[in-house]
Amino acid sequence: MTKLISPFKILARDENSKARTGILYTKHGMVRTPVFMPVATQACVKALTEEDLNYVGAECLLSNTYHLYLRPGTEALKKLGGLHNFMRWNKSILTDSGGFQVHSLSHLRKITEDGIWFKSHHDGSKHFFSPESVIESEAAIGSDIWTCLDVLMPNSAHKADLRRALATTKLWAERAAAHYKKIVPEQNIQQNEDGSFSVGHSILFGIIQGSIYPDLREEAAKHMARQDVHGFCIGGLSVGETLQEMNTAVEATIPHLPEGKPRYLMGLGTPIEILECIERGVDMFDCVWPTRVARNGQAMTSEGKVNIKNNAHRLSEEPLDKNCDCWVCKRYTRAYLSHLYRAGELTSHRLISIHNIRFLIKTMERVRAAILDGTFRQLKKEIIEKYK
């Protein structure tokens, strides 16, 4: 059978690190990398609309198969024309398989070699996820990038248990990749003369586990590199380990993955973490962090973090960030945002969320430009100094 073509074009590489910039092509268009993907877990980025997301420059969103399977239901989404039509989003969507969510409900689930039995956190109803059924659900959802079902274990687990979980994840990846080819028998990806790609169907990413152990990460990466998938997810990180442990795990993974396929580190969203992983060769990121901290009154700015609830901002006529191009910074003062937050007005959640996501997306724009002109290390140092 013909090997899958990865619709990923690398534009430039940084000479002093493993950072690279490129374009991932999907059936809904281009995703320029490195990219930050806002999280629309249940077909919505909290407090924001499709218009807001287009305004801030989002090119790809992340949604969650587990949550959409339970509500509104994958059959409902199929009848409604898929997730894009449902939420009126005309750019790319990646769906997480739901392994992380099932892991977080450990008291409601049971893992077997065949799949995962779990109870809905909504009504207690019993459900079963298998590698094949998750692919079926993602097909019904209609997302652009599908991910394989995996087993996530806490990093504090015994290494023997982590090794067993990895063995199951590897087996499930093989089953998911085989079922993908049944669902999408015609591999409609064409490379054009200019190096771009025309993509006519959803693509598949495999998930690499292995906790914080370099030997397990290497084993997982080598196995996944042999699978016929379009790209790779690095899972099981940003779940409480130290920055150094995360960096070590990434360093043990990247060298064993083919250069011409995209790499996505799941659930990572702070500027320092993202920049460290870009330097090590990661291309894609997502996280709820920028909207979560916005709901607690925290903004990311070119000068570091700003807590709008602090007294210093109550009478400030300054914008959140004088170097930001978002309309929140052009229109509103810190005093007004402070008032909204203190008064419990939900508009503060929306406005700070818009700014925070725009900040991360603009940071990715700056990173891509810096890789192209050879100044990535300088930019990384400049940003990290503000966020230490």
Image (cartoon, rainbow, N blue to C red):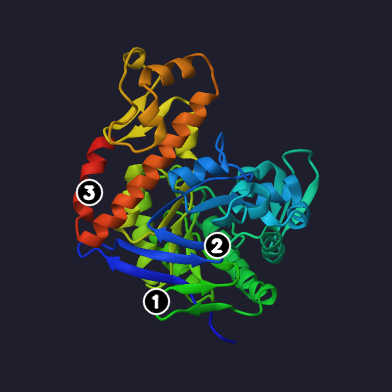
- Counting residues from the N terminus, which is met first, the one under dot 2 or under dot 3? 2
* Left or right, residue 165 beside residue 71: left
* Left or right, residue 378 beside residue 112: left
Residue sitting nearer the eye, 140 or 153: 140
Q: Mark 1 to mark 2: distance in Å?
A: 17 Å
- Counting residues from the N terminus, which is met first, the one under dot 1 or under dot 2? 2
Q: Amino acid at mark 2?
A: His
Pointer 1 local density, CA inside 10 Å: few below 14, some 14–19, many at least 20: few
Element assignment for label 2: loop
Q: Quadrant of the N terminus?
A: bottom right
Residue position marked by numbered label 1 in the rendering: 195
Res. 23 mark: none
Element assignment for label 1: loop
**Residue 24: quadrant of the picture:** bottom left
**Residue 323: quadrant of the picture:** top left
Residue position marked by numbered label 2 in the rendering: 28
- Counting residues from the N terminus, which is met first, the one under dot 3 or under dot 1? 1
